[in-house]
Amino acid sequence: MKYRASRSPLTWLGGLLALYLAVPLIAFLIRLAQPGDRGFDTPGLWPALWTSIESATIATALVCLFGIPMARWLARSRGPVARAVGGLVLLPIALPPVMSGLVLIYLVGPYSRLGELFNGGLTESVAGVVIAQTFVAGPFLIIAARTAFQGVDPALEDLAASLGHRPAARFWLVTMRIAAPGIRAGLLLTWLRAIGEYGATVLLAYHPYTLPVFTYVQFSSTGIPTTQAPTALALGVAIVVLIVAEIRLPRLLAGRGGRVDATAAATGASGSGPQPVEPVRVSMNLDVVVGGFRLVVAHEAASHRIAILGPSGAGKSMTLRAIAGFLGPDAGEVRFNSDVMTRVTVEARHLGYVPQGHTLFPGRSVWQQVVFATDADPSLAGWWLRTLRLDGLAGRLPGQLSGGQKQRVALARALARAPRLLLLDEPFSALDAPVREELRRELRRLQREAGLSTVLVTHDPEEAALLADEILVVADGRLLQAGPRAEVFARPASPQVARLLGIPNLIPATVAAPGLLALDAPTDAASEAPGLRIAAGTGSLPAGTAVLWTVRPDHVTIAPLAAGRPWDEIADHYPCVVDDVADIGTLTTLTVRLPGDQELRVRTTDQVAVAPGDACLVRLPPADITAWPAAPDSATGPAGSLALAAGTEGAGASLGPPTRRS
């Protein structure tokens, strides 16, 4: 049986509450419809209504003027002062209204210093009514607005800054726009609470009558009949205000806006593409602490396409934010080519910034997103929409886009201002594998065709290799290695770097002799079999030094055992047993076990003719093996690590000629 909401206990409980709230109002309306004196002709009724509307509106305006900045400050502030102010804001709600009136008398009463300064004009006047209503109703707006501001993603303000908008513009165009529904609800609650206030008002400003005070006076003097009129007026005003509060102008204009966006995009799509710009090479000398995390990174890039690679929490995004200027001038020196950018504000650096996730501005169409920058070129924006296959989507809102489309919009928005430098903070991490692969190839094509200067943050070695010419490897806020892509991948500076580069084979060994590593067999008193000896560059390391060595899985070759020929007569070939064979379509991954019970991963695109349990040979070219001293203090980074063997693809020469086993 399908679940039906109408049969849920929650629905019934909600229905009972709605019935409880509606029955008194229905009973009142029935009584109001009956003939008799309902009090509409009572003197003072209409002035009391006007006094209530006027004072509630003034009080709400004052709360809006001062309460929204306070709410914004409370939403962004931490510490004892903010907590104390937040508690004070709640006190008027906790106090009974009559007590609030008494507290206000001590402040603005006719015998207080402030009251004497105004000759008692702050009580028994409209000013007194406004003071009472502001005190009692103000917290409703502040609490609602604070919650709304807390729901605004700070990344959106940073994004607006990267698009050239200054602080005031960011507040009005981004923060207020997103927080507007919560602020609107707070203003509505504030106005309704103010117009209904009785306790504080009757003590502070008995005259002129507000509608609640007038109603109480009528009830005390003539009973219920003449209170029907003020009650009906209060109910009518509340209904009108609620209806007006539900009007959403953007909804009324949504259809027209979508057509305007589509027309503008179609016009811009005929424009020319980006003009060639000077490549930007980033240099940085950063030393900054944020939330107890210290980042120390110094590097001068030789390429205009670099990638910052590392695990989660390594400081990659923090490095990118420092380059963008979000961390301020105290983060350290940043240069674009020879231009020192350290004290240049974010909005003046002329960047394109694509943050993590699908970060689009809520409530803005695709076209409004891509032309949001202060210096966005509509013609160029239309060209990028077409180039990124977003034409036809200009009028859509973020909720109407797929993940890949959102990421394309974010990229088009960053590129529509012809940025000097494009910053990408793990832009594809939240996407499905097919979409991620497609967008990677798209960005690589744009790098090549448009000459984009890019800084990419990623934890994916394949993505870094695909989209950068130079790679910086960071971990724990430190730079472990930096250099050209081929050199970094071919010669990792330490075992930690090798792991971060996705190189799985890290195997312990001992230097047996110059150019020879020993994989010692497990301790076994019943066995005197020697351990396996592997030819590899050992540099100047003395015999007996414990090391870790690695070889890339795609540099290992599987070979069958040669019938009638010992394996040790075949150069660079070693015996092993196949543990696992995984065919994933485009390539095959094997796990083999060397003597000494050491696992080795192999990756190949060739046809594999072995199965788990088979004995075979693996070829390990000495020039492809990299080794490091195994001592912890020598594997902390480039300065304390030793790459002993040459890389491939022309990365460099080995430290010494490989020694074959005897």
Image (cartoon, rainbow, N blue to C red):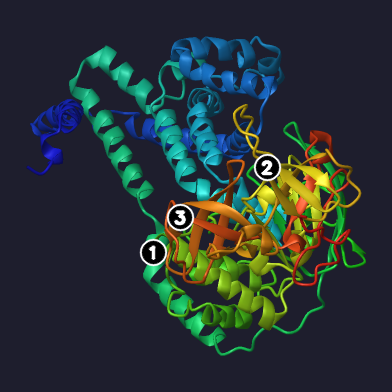
The residue closer to the viewer here, 67 or 320, is 320
Contact? badges 3 and 1 (CB < 8 Å)? no
Q: Which mark is residue 531?
A: 2
- Residue under label 1, please give it: 400
- For label 2, the SS is loop
- For label 1, the SS is helix
Instruction: Say if 572 sits above or below 506 in the image.
Output: below
Q: Which mark is residue 614?
A: 3
* Amino acid bearing label 2: Gly
Determine the residue positioned at 14% across, 28% down: 23
Q: Is residue 423 left or right of residue 5?
A: right
Q: Where residue 483 sits in the image (x, y, percent)?
A: 81, 61
- For label 3, the SS is loop
Instruction: Say if 511 sits above or below 124 in the image.
Output: below
Quadrant in the picture for the C terminus: bottom right
Whole-Å distance between the Cαs marked 3 and 1? Answer: 54 Å
* Amino acid bearing label 3: Asp
